[in-house]
Image: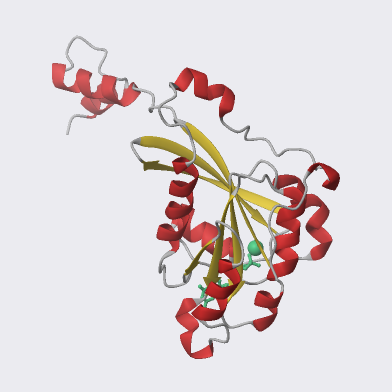
Amino acid sequence: MDSRYEIQRRAGGGSANASPALGAQSRRRKMPPRPADYKLQIIIIGSRGVGKTSLMERFTDDTFCEACKSTVGVDFKIKTVELRGKKIRLQIWDTAGQERFNSITSAYYRGAKGIVLVYDITKQETFDDLPKWMRMIDKYASEEAELLLVGNKLDCETDRIITKQTAERFTSRISGMRFCEASAKDNFNVEECFLKLVDDILAKMPLEIPNRKLSNSILSLQPEPEVPPELNPPRMHCC
Ligand SMILES: Nc1nc2c(ncn2[C@@H]2O[C@H](COP(=O)(O)OP(=O)(O)O)[C@@H](O)[C@H]2O)c(=O)[nH]1
Ligand SMILES: [Mg+2]
């Protein structure tokens, strides 16, 4: 192929010699993407090693890392999804599970519209830690936040310690909390769990409000400052 032709194409089809079809194509490429109708924050919490980072990376990038580094403080990823005819830009905050990071991670609870609480179905202690995480939610999260409990590492069925019934019993005591099991490793049920949570959030939002009005009601993407505990009375009771 003539190399001059290649240069013309890269220049954007502005030359008089460029075909009308090519011009139309480059014009199409320049169209900015449709802006998101909603911007939502979701936070992932739970004890260390349960697979919080793995679930986030599976959902946002469809990748899995066997030997990932432990999360330090807070990390985040963006993913845009379409649900109920709306384009939603999700900002997913992945937190470190160790207590020493609680003062950092707690600042991210308040802005979250959805909270994903994760345990490992093969590790009793990660399930026993759930009431501790619920206390963090009661203390720092918005009362309106949708809650999802995820039992991760479903691919390790033979090492399972926490039965589905035990986890369902736990969730049934917490108003509005959803429950699902997933495997970040095998990519089982991950997208479904996240999308269900987003759908629950959308179900509570006034979708008929025009975009311009919404810009005032959508959440800021910046983490909110820490909320004094006395401003956030506990909203639910678990074991
Ligand atoms: N078998 C299995 N291992 C997983 C799964 N999800 C995460 N892991 C592994 O569990 C370890 C901790 O995962 P990580 O995502 O860093 O946990 P985090 O500390 O909660 O963020 C890593 O070695 C992961 O490869 C899963 O679904 N199945
Ligand atoms: Mg992590």
Question: Looking at the image, how many numbered discs can be counted on the residues?
Answer: 0
**At which x and y percent is residue 49?**
65, 72
Residue 19 appears in the figure: no
Kindly tell me whether residue 196 is visible in this rendering: yes
Instruction: Left or right? Give the position of 81 relative to 7.
Output: right
Q: Is residue 61 found left or right of 173 in the rendered image?
A: left
- Give the residue at x 40% y 35%: 87
Which residue shows up at 77% across the image and 45% down it? 232
Residue 15 percent across, percent down from the top left: 24, 12
Instruction: Pinpoint residue 185: horizontal percent, then vertical percent.
Output: 47, 72
- Give the quarter of the image for residue 136: bottom right
Q: Position of residue 67 (x, y in %)?
A: 59, 72
User: In this orientation, which residue lies closer to the viewer: 71 or 81?
Assistant: 81
Looking at this view, name the residue that lies furthest to the bottom. 158
24 with respect to 104 (left or right): left
In the image, residue 177 sits, relative to residue 201, either above or below, namely below
Asked if 130 appears above or below 76 in the picture, the reply is below
- Comparing 214 with 3, the one in front is 214
Q: Residue at x 41, y 67 (%)?
A: 187
Quadrant containing the N terminus is: top left
Compared with residue 71, is residue 167 higher up or lower down, i.e. above or below?
A: below
Q: Quadrant of ligand 2?
A: bottom right
Q: Nearer the viewer, residue 123 or 2?
A: 123
